[in-house]
Amino acid sequence: MSTTLTLTSAPELAWWRSRVVRRFLSHRLAVLGLVMITLLSLACAFGPYLLPFDSLQIDLFARFAPPLAGDHYLGADSLGRDLAARLLMAGRISLLVGFFSMLLATFVGTLVGVIAGYMGGWVNTVLMRTVDGFLSFPTLFLLLALAVALKPSPIMITIIISLTSWMTVARIVATEVATLKEREFVLAGRMLGLSRAHIMFREILPNAMGPIIVAATLTVARAILLEAYISYLGFGIQPPLPSWGNMLNGAQQYLDRAPWLAIIPGLAITMAVTSFNLIGDGLRDALDIRSEHK
């Protein structure tokens, strides 16, 4: 959906921001998603300091302790490590990987999309065919191949996920910029002798932020899922450093004996991904001018 809005003054910008906030807050599911991800993020950031156990502390007498067993609020794993502490520490890793993957993928995708959409011609053809080339590879297989070839540290996993996530952003931005470059304010900029870089990044890009913000929000959810996939398969974040994905990997052999070891991190992944998807839906509706009269 197009979210084009040319803002020429501070009052117009203030009106637009208040309108977006108002429309977003009227989207109940989006607000629910924002509340859920905020609570989850705060729990992961500060929760480990409030728990009586460290995420690496081993208590063999508490092996497979069920949820609400004494001081182990969510139970303990096969080594007696507190599941709540590991879940929240894993959440830090998974959420940070998702967030920074989004930042890198959005930066690369936006840069490619702005250049391709504004320049057009052979530049657009080359860049978009490059995007198509990346999209032609199955994402999961490409991720696994890169993870096997490179050292699977959190930083490397972030880069790997970014390399498989920027293409969708690039296509969205290229389409939006190709539409915007024919608008009156761009033609006026050309007549004033503004440079291409100025027009692309100072005039067009701010007016294309709506689709970029929505795409970035959905990219976080995708990155969290991708990290969980490759960590579950054993090629992502490596123990003893926890992530939601490798917690699922370690729990699969104990499904019949201690199913909560898989259910709890699975619920955390579901909550995070659902929250970002709901926020993305709310932002899409809030930033869509045409839905004002629907």
Image (spheres, rainbow, N blue to C red):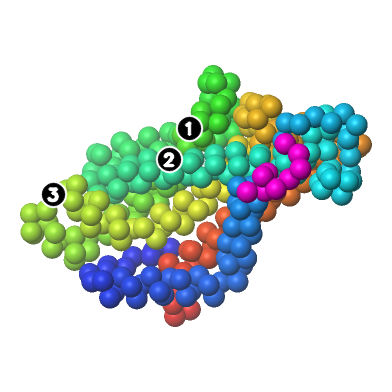
Nearest the camera: 192 or 129?
Answer: 192
Where does residue 243 sit, x and y in percent of width and height?
66, 36
- The 10 Å Cα crowd at callout 2, few under 14, some 14 to 19, many 20 or more, is some
Q: Is disc 2 in contact with disc 3, using a CB cutoff of under 8 Å? A: no
Q: Residue at x 22, y 46 (%)?
A: 119
Q: Residue at x 48, y 44 (%)?
A: 102
**Which of the labelled discs sits on residue 142, or is there none?**
none
- According to the picture, the residue beneath numbered tag 1 turns out to be 159
Q: Is disc 1 in contact with disc 2, using a CB cutoff of under 8 Å? A: yes
Residue 47 in the magenta stretch? The answer is yes
First-in-chain label (1 vs 2): 2
First-in-chain label (2 vs 3): 2
Where does residue 162 sit, x and y in percent of width and height?
47, 37
- According to the picture, the residue beneath numbered tag 3 turns out to be 195
Q: Is residue 56 left or right of residue 159?
A: right
Whether 85 is drawn above or below 230: the answer is: below
Where does residue 23 sit, x and y in percent of width and height?
48, 74
Q: Amino acid at mark 3?
A: Ser
Q: Is residue 2 left or right of residue 260?
A: left
Viewer can see residue 265: no
- According to the picture, the residue beneath numbered tag 2 turns out to be 104
Q: Quadrant of residue 263?
A: top right
- The 10 Å Cα crowd at callout 3, few under 14, some 14 to 19, many 20 or more, is few
Looking at the rendering, the stretch of residues picked out in magenta corresponds to 46-54
Q: What element does badge 1 sit on?
A: helix
Q: Amino acid at mark 1?
A: Ile
First-in-chain label (3 vs 1): 1
Q: What element does badge 2 sit on?
A: helix
